[in-house]
Amino acid sequence: MRIALASPPVASSLDDGLAHTDRLLAEAAARGSAVVCFPEAYLPGLRGLDFDVPPFTRADQERVLAAASEMTRRHRVAAILGLEWHTAAGRHIAGVVLDAAGELVGVQTKNQLDPTEEPLYVPGRTRRLFDVAGLKFGVAICHEGFRYPETVRWAAARGAQVVFHPHCTGSDKTGTVPTTWGDPAGAYYEKAMMCRALENTVYFASANYAFRYQESATTLVGPQGERVTHLPYGEAGVLVADLDLSAATGKLARRYAPERYEEDAGG
């Protein structure tokens, strides 16, 4: 199974973002990928950071969805698109899954928001497992995968072979460029990626924006917590890798025994 992780630059407009999406889907498909994952809320962009994000209405949502559907159908590749997603509850951060025929398979909302996101978005309340192109996977979005391990374990315990992790860390305006992946003195993000894979015995596939000053790389981590591959920091493009699905057993996730966590009242 060959997958791809897309790392586009910040979009200057919605049309610019769609153009980057099309280009990266084409590249991933040409290199034989079955599924491509994009960063968090890439269209129209994640709000509350140091770059401008345009308005994004329900009409914009429908236009983007129609355009993305045409792209995945034309390139014959499935995609997890990081979108802003409007429902009756409000504006969500979401991973929208389209198959290679351009059909909407489903949507995974971000249910554990970072505290800084709460004024801008509403959390979702449900989780789901996806089965696309012969791959079983879950989606945990940024803060969820970094801070709430149970969001990854939920999917792994139900048979996910990989958990895709659209995320957003870094800046084009300020910061430093890491020199070593998983640097003990660096930010915790890449160490968390290792933990999410190792503690569940599944692949963890994390896609970030191609910021000039990335705080974490677009990375694939294997079921034993090993870094399989990553894109160089700040490089826009597509990370393509082959998965050995027989190694993604989910063994440790399935050993979770919630009945052993009954509260002891003491006495």
Image (spheres, rainbow, N blue to C red):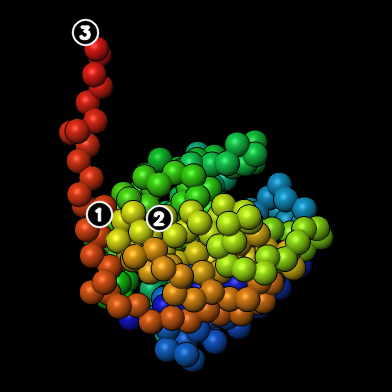
Q: Nearer the viewer, residue 39 or 199?
A: 199
Q: Marks 1/2: CA distance? A: 11 Å
Residue identifier under label 1: 252
Residue type at mark 2?
Arg
Q: Earlier in the sequence, mark 3 or mark 1?
A: 1
147 above or below 259?
below
Between discs 1 and 2, the one toward the N terminus: 2
The answer to whether any part of residue 5 appears in the image is yes
Badge 3 is on which residue? Answer: 267
Residue 19 in the image, given as x and y percentages of width and height = 65, 78
Helix, strand, or loop for circle 1? Answer: helix
**What is the tally of numbered marks visible in this picture?**
3
Which amino acid, by three-letter code, is at mark 1?
A: Leu
Callout 1 crowding tier (Cα within 10 Å): few <14, some 14–19, many ≥20: some
Numbered disc in front, either 3 or 1: 3
Q: Residue drawn at (47%, 90%), measured in percent from left and top?
A: 31
**Which mark is in front, 3 or 2?**
3
Q: Which residue is mark 2?
A: 196
Q: Which residue is rendered at x = 33% and y = 81% of the image?
A: 1
Q: Label 3 is placed on what type of residue?
A: Gly
Q: Is residue 26 above or below residue 196?
A: below
How far apart in space, not on screen, are marks 3 and 1 (Cα)? 33 Å
Rendering quarter of residue 56: bottom right
Q: Are the residues flagged by discs 3 and 2 in contact, CB closer than 8 Å?
A: no
Residue 126 location (% of width, % of height)? 37, 44
**For residue 227, which numbered disc appears in the image?**
none
Question: Where in the figure is residue 33, as x and y percent of width and height?
Answer: 42, 83
For this rendering, which residue is in front, 100 or 10? 10
Residue 26's place in the image compared with 58, above or below, is below
